[in-house]
Image: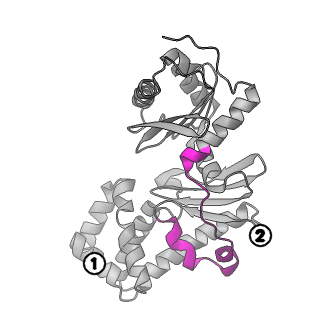
Amino acid sequence: METTAPFIVAIDGGGTRCRVVAQIGSERTMVETGSANVSSDFTAAIHEINLGLNGLAQRLDVSMDTLASAPAYIGLAGVTGAVIAERVRLALPFRHARVEDDRVAAVRGSLGAGDGVLAHCGTGSFFAVQSGSTIRLIGGWGPVLGDEASAQWVGRRALSYTLEHIDGRRPASALAERLIAQFNDAAGVVAFASTAQPAQLGALAPRVTATAKDGDTLACQIMRDGAFEIDRAVRDLDWRIGQPVCLTGGIGPYYAEFLPADVRAALTRPVGEPLDGALALAEAYAREIGRSDPEPRQTR
């Protein structure tokens, strides 16, 4: 027998994984598949989403037609505008779906329904402010032109400062000496940096945060540099004292002690995660279209 309870569907897809979830009342059912970045590989992303939808239908014991009748919120990496959002919507089976950049769900998940500012610093980075029902995003322009304070940005800066250390322009540093030992010499540092992918550069960030904790001059300077970028973004988003500020992502929380006192005092733990945000947005979308209850279903 198919379920007769109303439900919603939310999808949170990124460069690492895609999570497809249905919520019936307070009960969630989730299926996880692989990478779903629609700009990097549209066909592969849609394939992973459909794998998740089929798996979800099986777990719920419903037909795909029933699943497709539910209101859906779809937050995906690589949704850069209305054109690709519509392309995604048409490629999926839902009758009613909203497709957006995955950052929106991350903001809603971190801040809940309240006002505040988010600084997300993972392999990449972006910054956002939520005010009422409005979300404004800045940054996130990728490893070549942006992603300030991200893990890959920190890794790249560590290599750059190591070269300055070799030139005698930076003081003694355990971080620099460890990176020189890893890559043998300046030529090795340059060779690695010239071909390294963002994830490879980001893999150097834990070494920076660890040596900064030990007080290493070079590592602390990099963390102060990143904190400066976060502070600049927070103020560009018209943050006001009293509003919460959330630091998320793998390296984000490590900046806390390097931020100015007023921002540091406003730091708040995230309310939830991106999937929570996607579900909240799915609920809002269902109310908006008056479709919280899917179309009548047939029993099998």
Q: Is residue 207 visible in this depiction of the protein? A: yes
Q: Are discs 2 and 1 less than 8 Å apart at CB?
A: no
Q: Amino acid at mark 1?
A: Arg
Q: Is residue 290 left or right of residue 295?
A: right
Q: Secondary structure at mark 2?
A: loop
- Residue 279, by quadrant, is top right
Answer above or below: position of 140 versus 160.
above
- Residue 27, by quadrant, is top right
Residue 239 on image: x %, y %: 74, 65
- Residue 45, by quadrant, is top left
Q: Is residue 73 left or right of residue 135?
A: left
Q: Which segment is the magenta one?
A: 251-277
Residue 201 on image: x %, y %: 37, 61
Query: Is 187 a magenta residue?
Result: no
24 vs 187, nearest the viewer: 24
**Marker disc for residue 242:** 2
Residue 132 on image: x %, y %: 79, 50
- In the rendered image, which residue does mark 1 sit on? 178
- Label whose residue precedes the other's in the sequence (2 or 1): 1
Name the front one of labels 2 and 1.
2
Query: Is 271 a magenta residue?
Result: yes
